[in-house]
Image (tube, rainbow, N blue to C red):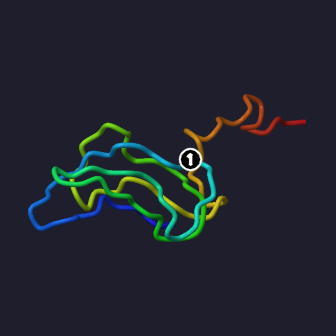
Amino acid sequence: MVEVRMPKPGNEVESCLLLSWKKEVGERVRAGEVLCEIETDKAVMEVQSPADGVLLERLAEAGQEVPVQTPIAIVGAPEARPPPGPPSPPAPDAWPPRRA
């Protein structure tokens, strides 16, 4: 898995506005493909995927001001996707085992 971080487009820039996402969670991406657009006080820029894979997670929302170098997304292999929520509890009669 690879973290995508908010870039630092200049020495004076401390945060950028995440304007819009161009890819959906679960969508395949290639290295160099545009994931989102950001805005500084001077320009609109594209943030590209650093690796081939799947957009596993968005860590920031469109319209959010994000400090530079903060992770904004995770790209990785589809099987690397984190499980959705807590694990399921065991069935009520699965433990302890029944005696015969």
Q: Is residue 83 above or below residue 6?
A: above
**What residue do we see at 32% from left, 37% from top?**
63
User: In this view of the protein, which residue sits in the foreground, 37 or 82?
Assistant: 37
Residue 26, given in percent of the width and then of the height, sits at: 62, 49
81 displayed left or right of 49: right
Q: Residue furthest left?
A: 12
Residue 49, given in percent of the width and then of the height, sits at: 47, 65
Residue 81, located in which quarter of the rendered image? bottom right
**What residue do we see at 29% from left, 39% from top?**
64
How many numbered marks appear?
1
Residue 46, located in which quarter of the rendered image? bottom left
Type of residue at label 1? Val
User: In this view of the protein, which residue sits in the foreground, 42 or 53?
Assistant: 42
Residue 30, given in percent of the width and then of the height, sits at: 58, 67
User: In this view of the protein, which residue sits in the foreground, 43 or 94?
Assistant: 43
The quadrant of the rendering that contains the C terminus is top right
Q: Is residue 98 above or below residue 24?
A: above
Q: Residue furthest front?
A: 43
Q: Residue furthest right?
A: 100
**What residue do we see at 77% from left, 36% from top?**
94
- Dot 1: few (<14), some (14–19), or many (≥20) neighbours within 10 Å? some
**Tag 1's secondary structure?**
loop
Residue 97, given in percent of the width and then of the height, sits at: 78, 39
82 displayed left or right of 89: left
Q: Is residue 14 above or below residue 86?
A: below
**What residue do we see at 82% from left, 35% from top?**
98
| Residue identified by numbered label 1 | 25
47 displayed left or right of 93: left
